[in-house]
Image: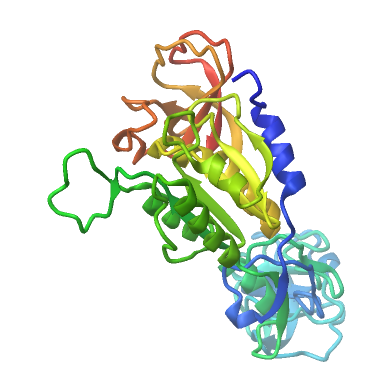
Amino acid sequence: MENYITYERAIEMIQQAAPSACTEKVSVRQAAGRILAEPVFSPISQPPFPRSPLDGYAFHAEDSKGASKDTPVVLQVVDTIYAGEWCGKTIEHGQAVRLMTGAPIPAGCDCVLRYEDTDNGRDSVQLYVELKPWSNYCFAGEDFQAGAELLPAGTRLTGIALGALAAAGLDRDDEYVTVYKRLTCAIVCTGDELVGSEVRPLPPGKIYSSNETILRARIGELGMEALPEIGRGEDDVDRLAEVISQAVAKADVVFTTGGVSVGDKDYVRAALEKIGAEMVFAGVRLKPGSPFMFSLVNGVPVLSLSGNPFAAYATFELFGRELLASMSGAWNLRPLVFQAVLASDFTKSSKGRRFIRGIFRDGAVTLPDGHSSGQLGSAALANCLVDIPAGSGPLHAGETVTVHLL
């Protein structure tokens, strides 16, 4: 691992080498889950007028001075306003309007008193509470102002983000937003030992392929498109080079698994060299998945992951998500990193940097049994990676650790 680079340097090199994704315009109504490439500005203020946040009475706050249950202030009720209606009157001192939640507050009023603090009168009303100016008063533009940036570039258009566009009147069929094109990803799993789940019974010496299922599902969960299988990478340099070339021709990003170490049939690097790949780096100082490689083939990024299922998964989470975030503008694809408290021991010393599976809940991380790179059963419930620095001894419950939330 002498020539391997650090995790941080690998992230920097991925960010620097990642090509920018193309953009396209799509209808707001077809944009769910997409990533904004350009900010959206609101054409209106929201709310577009001062409005009441509750059912009550609007009036001049000065008129309620001294009001109490024992000494109520009486005002003349000059109108009743419902949500969706408009009152063109200017309310004078000594007057009040009865209004409902969401109704416009008329000119001349600077507060709203809830029904429960009045006698709920219709022609006149008794006020039992003194209010200060602007109490229970929602100003026009309190949510957002006309011309203001409503959603910045890089925002994923979730339901709530699309709701903000709708509140600004921007969800018609003829309203468009500029988004990044959805990245297409190809997956090439290598190894003569791999067979599909349709093979029954499992032949001697063979294992069922799980890496493609893991990556395909994860890519979809992150809002990208995983292409149908292009071909399995057999343990043959020429065949593997052919399959990777086909993947590069069809996808924005290619992920390979297996064949990246130094075994007799680890042919991924040779296959990449055969098709003219530019090697950005080969090897990162961490476990699992240290032989991880990053290269470019005709400008298309190729991330070559370990064949061990958990190692492939972990390096995808650490590096694949960074690449997808850099290429798509989706900053929220990057894992959340924070401090947490260990709820169980990790008895091994860590000569090098290590990322282990963990289950984060209520501020604490529990470590499941089984941390081998090939073990998936203990990873199924894991929702984080625990970052253990190089040179660490055994870790004990109660210690603080750095966690990458998955």
- Is 26 left or right of 317, judged from the image as shown? right
Quadrant, the N terminus = top right
Residue 186, position in %: x, y?
51, 59
Q: Which residue is pictured at 63% across the width and 75% down the height?
A: 101
Q: How is the image coloured?
A: rainbow
Question: Which image quarter: residue 251?
Answer: bottom right
Compared to residue 142, the image places residue 377 above or below, namely above
Compared to residue 358, the image places residue 326 above or below, namely below
Q: Which residue is pictured at 58% across the width and 15% down the height?
A: 390
Question: Which image quarter: residue 347?
Answer: top left
Camera-side residue of 299 and 42: 299
Camera-side residue of 304 and 122: 304
- Is 183 left or right of 74, judged from the image as shown? left
Q: Is residue 142 visible?
A: no
Question: Which image quarter: residue 131?
Answer: bottom right
Camera-side residue of 168 and 17: 17
Q: How many marks?
A: 0
